[in-house]
């Protein structure tokens, strides 16, 4: 397993992953701040500095385990930005916007990365120098991973398992009597997600949603 590990490629993966999870959490905090909750700002988490958001397990160890285990996709996460939903001016709509902000940000980043990827492909023939060609290949890989990682983060976070964003959205939409039962799943949400990842139980999600979007954006 270690024989198949490529440190340089892992670094190329980690860079867009760190940016994707940082932007995701910042978007949650920024949306909450604009809608009336200053908790993230007061905690110093309303920042695009990755150091303030990194989680050793979610940002490094989990991606490494998935890479070494040959998992079909790479996934990671940062420390959740603290949000007090009771501070929001409108609890229901505010919660929906805050929960959706990270997902929307990752979709935008995936689209932007695909545009940059296509732009690099256009200029690649203009650079015949071997050093520039090597640099361009690294950049192409980096933006391919950025597309993949941001789409995975966006779509995975829409899975209706608390505390994922999809779970948060579903919680708000459920009737009160069902909402109280559903939130009891939250303490087990992380373990459910890891189990799904490690057992390749999300193959349908990859086959019918993630892979077609990646192919569409990269024109494969």
Image (cartoon, rainbow, N blue to C red):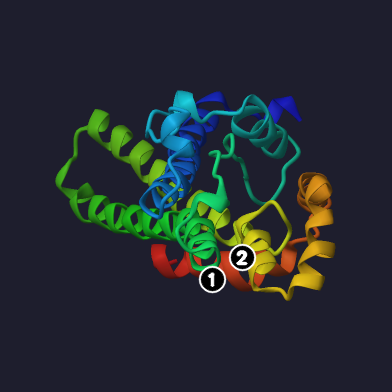
Q: Is residue 185 left or right of residue 13?
A: right
Element assignment for label 2: helix
Spot occupied by residue 170 in the image (x, y as percentages of width and height): 67, 68
Q: Residue, x 75% and y 71% (percent of image)?
A: 176
Camera-side residue of 12 and 133: 12
**Is there CB contact under 8 Å for labels 1 and 2?**
no
Residue corresponding to mark 2: 169
The nearer-to-camera label among 1 and 2 is 2
Spot occupied by residue 141 in the image (x, y as percentages of width and height): 42, 43
Q: Is residue 123 left or right of residue 111?
A: left
The image quarter containing residue 209 is: bottom right
Q: Residue, x 70% and y 64% (percent of image)?
A: 160
Instruction: Give the spatial CA distance, label 1 vs label 2.
Output: 25 Å
Q: Earlier in the sequence, mark 1 or mark 2?
A: 2
Q: Is residue 54 left or right of residue 146?
A: right
74 to 173, vertically: above or below: above
Residue corresponding to mark 1: 212
In the image, which disc is placed on residue 58?
none
Spot occupied by residue 102 in the image (x, y as percentages of width and height): 48, 53
Q: Residues within 10 Å of mark 2 (few under 14, many from 20)?
A: many
Spot occupied by residue 25 in the image (x, y as percentages of width and height): 49, 43
Camera-side residue of 101 and 220: 101
The image quarter containing residue 66 is: top right
Element assignment for label 1: helix
Q: Residue, x 50% and y 26% (percent of image)?
A: 8
28 to 16, vertically: above or below: below
Q: Residue, x 41% and y 35% (percent of image)?
A: 41
């Amino acid at each position: 397993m270690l024989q198949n590990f490529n440190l340089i490629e892992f670094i190329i993966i980690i860079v867009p992953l760190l940016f994707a999870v940082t932007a995701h959490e910042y978007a949650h905090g920024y949306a909450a701040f604009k809608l009336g909750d200053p908790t993230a700002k007061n905690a110093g988490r309303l920042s695009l500095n990755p150091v303030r958001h990194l989680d050793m397990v979610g940002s490094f160890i989990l991606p490494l385990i998935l890479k070494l285990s040959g998992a079909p996709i790479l996934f990671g996460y940062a420390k959740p930005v603290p949000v007090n939903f009771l501070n929001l001016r409108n609890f229901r709509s505010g919660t929906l916007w805050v929960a959706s902000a990270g997902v929307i940000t990752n979709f935008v980043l995936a689209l932007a990365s695909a545009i940059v990827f296509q732009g690099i492909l256009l200029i690649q023939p203009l650079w015949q120098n071997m050093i520039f060609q090597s640099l361009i290949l690294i950049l192409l890989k980096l933006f391919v991973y950025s597309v993949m990682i941001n789409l995975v983060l966006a779509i995975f976070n829409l899975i209706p398992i608390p505390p994922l964003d999809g779970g948060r959205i579903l919680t708000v939409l459920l009737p009160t009597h069902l909402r109280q039962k559903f939130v009891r799943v939250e303490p087990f949400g992380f373990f459910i997600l890891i189990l799904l990842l490690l057992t390749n139980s999300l193959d349908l999600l990859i086959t019918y949603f993630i892979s077609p979007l990646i192919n569409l954006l990269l024109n494969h």
